Image (cartoon, rainbow, N blue to C red):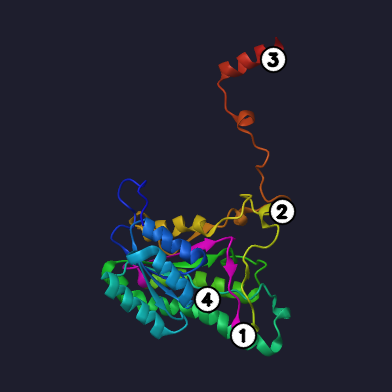
Amino acid sequence: MPSAAQSGPLPLAGKVALVTGGAAGVGRAVVHGYVEAGAKVAVLDRDADRLGKLCTEMGPDVHGTVGSVEKLVDNQRAVSEALEAYGRLDVFVGNAGVGAGNLPLAQVPAEHLEAALDEIFAINVKGYLLGARASLAPLLRTRGNMIFSCSLASYRAVDDGVLYVATKHADLGIVRQLAWEFAPHVRVNGVAVGVARTRMEGLHSLGQEPIDAVLPGAEHVIPQGFIPEPEDYAGAFVFLASDAARVATGECLWADSGFGVRGIGSPAGGRNLRADAVELRTRRESARSLITDAG
């Protein structure tokens, strides 16, 4: 429910969003952020238990559909149920995704490699495109927008393994190409999410259990110096879904805690900055300081 402390018009008042993978992690935070911003939210997620708990917690502002993003029929059903529940669709958020246990290519068992590739691309890439296609017609009617969860891994090599990184690079391509294909009627953007204190689902084809999405010691190499919570990313999704972002399309909003500008010798170059040491003074104040020091 929107917070009673909020004043003024809510940025997503009257809008309806569909979020895939919205029952946990960053997706769940986006659902909460959208509801607090005034939206009604439909959620497509394969975990019936987590989805049920989310819907119970959020009440009539959230409608859940159990299904798999890699199936077109499930994406179509989620869109149909969103329209039936709330009468329109303004925002599609492609967010459902899995990792591959941070495995480099050489460590993926050869006998499972093809199945692993098929599985991760089906969820992380195919799922985005199927959701985009299923939601396109109602978004054209509302001149709505799409937002996709991208990553730091959409731009550069990281420790997450080549299978995951390849899919996230593909997701950035989806943002850019669909923004052109759907202009001027539907905006398409992404959020380059950095690390978050959450769990990353693994691949069934490799028998992987969920793992911590944050590597040990990450806070020491992040320029901002702290591990973000999933809720820290919700604001980026709210902004891109709102009319305040009406001039933004084909872009990926970086929310990576500064990883993109991380230095070689030190993650952050301004750790020793102090306000009293850098405060600008007038010439008179500087002269007075010199007289005081001399006295």
N-terminal label among 4 and 2: 4
Q: Which circle's residue, 1 or 4, is located before the other in the chain?
A: 4
Magenta region: 182-204
Tell me which residue sits at (66%, 87%) in the image: 112
Q: Is residue 177 visible?
A: no
Which residue is denoted by mark 4 in the rendering? 124
The Cα–Cα distance between marks 4 and 3, rounded to whole angstroms, is 64 Å
- Residue wearing tag 2: 264
Residue at 74% x, 51% y: name it. 265
**In the rendered image of this protein, does residue 206 appear above or below residue 95?**
below
Q: Is residue 167 above or below residue 3?
A: below
| Inter-mark Cα distance, 4 to 2 | 31 Å
Q: Disc 1 and disc 4: Cα gap in Å?
A: 15 Å
Using a 10 Å C-alpha cutoff, classify the residue at mark 1 as few (fewer than 14 neighbours), some (14 to 19) or many (20 or more). some
Labels 1 and 4 touching (C-beta < 8 A): no
Residue 15 seen in this snapshot: yes
**In which quadrant of the rendered view does residue 61 lie?**
bottom left
Quick one: label 3 or label 1, which is nearer the N terminus? 1
Q: Which mark is residue 293?
A: 3
Element carrying mark 4 = helix
Q: Amino acid at mark 3?
A: Asp
How crowded pointer 4 is (Cα within 10 Å; few <14, some 14-19, many 20+) is rated as many
Say which quadrant the C terminus sits in: top right
Q: Which mark is residue 205?
A: 1
